[in-house]
Image: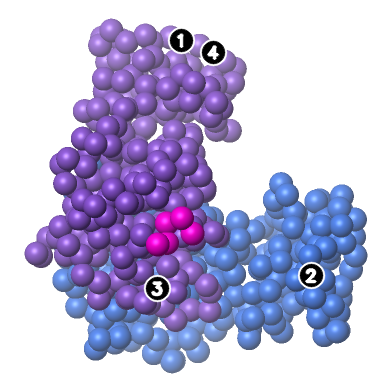
Chain colours: A blue, B purple
Amino acid sequence: MKEKKYRDREGKFLVEGLLLCEELVASATYRKLIESLVFSPTEASSERARKLIADWTARGLTVKEIDAVGLKRLSDTVTPQGLIAVVRKAAVDFGDLLAAAPYCLLILDGVTDPGNLGTILRTANWFGADAVLLSANSVEWTNPKVVRSSMGAVFHIPVVSGLPLAETLSELANRGYSLFAAEAGGDTPFMAATFGKKNALIFGGETSGISQEVSPFVTTKLRIPGQGKCDSLNVAVAAGIILSEVFRRKSTS
Amino acid sequence: MKEKKYRDREGKFLVEGLLLCEELVASATYRKLIESLVFSPTEASSERARKLIADWTARGLTVKEIDAVGLKRLSDTVTPQGLIAVVRKAAVDFGDLLAAAPYCLLILDGVTDPGNLGTILRTANWFGADAVLLSANSVEWTNPKVVRSSMGAVFHIPVVSGLPLAETLSELANRGYSLFAAEAGGDTPFMAATFGKKNALIFGGETSGISQEVSPFVTTKLRIPGQGKCDSLNVAVAAGIILSEVFRRKSTS
């Protein structure tokens, strides 16, 4: 399950380490999707780890002890933290999601770096974005590096993956969404943009930017004014700056 | 020179790949600090790479051809890009820097993740921050991962490292700087803060936060309002949001 094809086939993924396992239980959705836990007693020896193991056992979950070598084989990291949970992917119904007329959707068009996607999920959850939609050519959100760099935010925000972007954007436009895209050459400084009651924010890939398929649907191209010598901002930083603005407007409107 | 101790002893570091080597030449400071270039003709075979090699040779720099195996030994990456430059570290005089009464200094108090530091340098350069000051326990800025994730911004913004933080902050306060620190529990929402003509923005480490040594000097503790379930934002995202605000105020003041 360290490999994408197994995660896809099984509809499950691995969650590694104490902090992330604690976040699983803190999530109303994922608390119910935990399948099992494996732990190595030599590594998961802290009081917090022992408490979690006892708690999960008491919940009737499958909890298995393995040795450090077995754990290392399952682990994605060089220094495993002694605990790995197997969880089912949450099923998000896109129709239900839209029916609630969410204020802010994030759409990622070819974001391929796992660290960037994890950081974007963390940021989106921080500000209270309603969901993150991923194009088929974005990195898979159950990738262990994504889960890790999201710091568990991935358990707290709905993620919809593999969407056909053109159809999705057309649907959003029909439902009254304004479609904003962040582009280095955008004509509207983000602080001068008008955000409405339904906002979709589109971010392109690290080197590819917004794809040709997406471009025709964009209502407003947002620029983050800068003066440096370099070309652009990191996509997670750009998403943070624009999300911060969108939610600042919400709180003052 | 892949190791810190050699970089420190020699006062030099490695810059790998075509894009970063091009950024070196685009930097008024670093253009003069290039020592040599090694390249593997089988890998550095694009027209852009050949142009750079010819250009550097014409400048009278030491340009050496090596084979792919030799290059791989020097390289920090799994798939080397065929070009590695050796450059001297730029010497930044902290006194000269302060004499120019810079509008915005960034101070990093124990930022240890190379990707985060690189992204912060890229962001600081984008907005036009005047310099980045690093505590002794922050990751070294000539680390190859820092250089890479800065996307070359490290050649365009002065970096001062190894500063004794307490003395530095005391000096900045004496010179009329307001000292802002980003903290999850800060009492001032960043958008309500008053920025002056001299601003120092302090960011703590990914898990450690602002250190005890720094805390007494802080004038204002800034919070980035959020509503998510998770504890905090990534430090590079937090720096981006606050830098964006500081430079937005500058442009409208």
Specify the farthest residue to the left.
Answer: B253
Q: Of the residues under marks 3 and 1, which one precedes in the sequence?
A: 1
Q: Is residue A199 above or below residue A208?
A: below
Between the C-alphas of marks 1 and 4, the distance is: 7 Å
Q: Main secondary structure of the magenta part?
A: loop
Marks 2 & 4, CB-CB < 8 Å contact: no
Q: Is residue B206 above or below residue A13?
A: above
Q: Is residue B194 visible?
A: yes
Q: Chain of mark 1?
A: B
Q: Please provide the residue range marked out in magenta.
A: B212-216
Marks 1 & 4, CB-CB < 8 Å contact: no
Tag 4 secondary structure: loop
Q: Would you name the residue on which mark 2 appears?
A: A47
The residue closer to the viewer here, A167 or A75, is: A75
The residue closer to the viewer here, A197 or A72, is: A72
**Which amino acid does the dot numbered 1 rest on?**
Glu
Question: Residue B186 placed where, x, y %?
Answer: 40, 73
Q: Chain of mark 4?
A: B
Q: Would you name the residue on which mark 1 appears?
A: B65
Q: Would you name the residue on which mark 4 appears?
A: B67
Question: Residue A53 placed where, x, y %?
Answer: 82, 73
Residue A16, image quadrant: bottom right
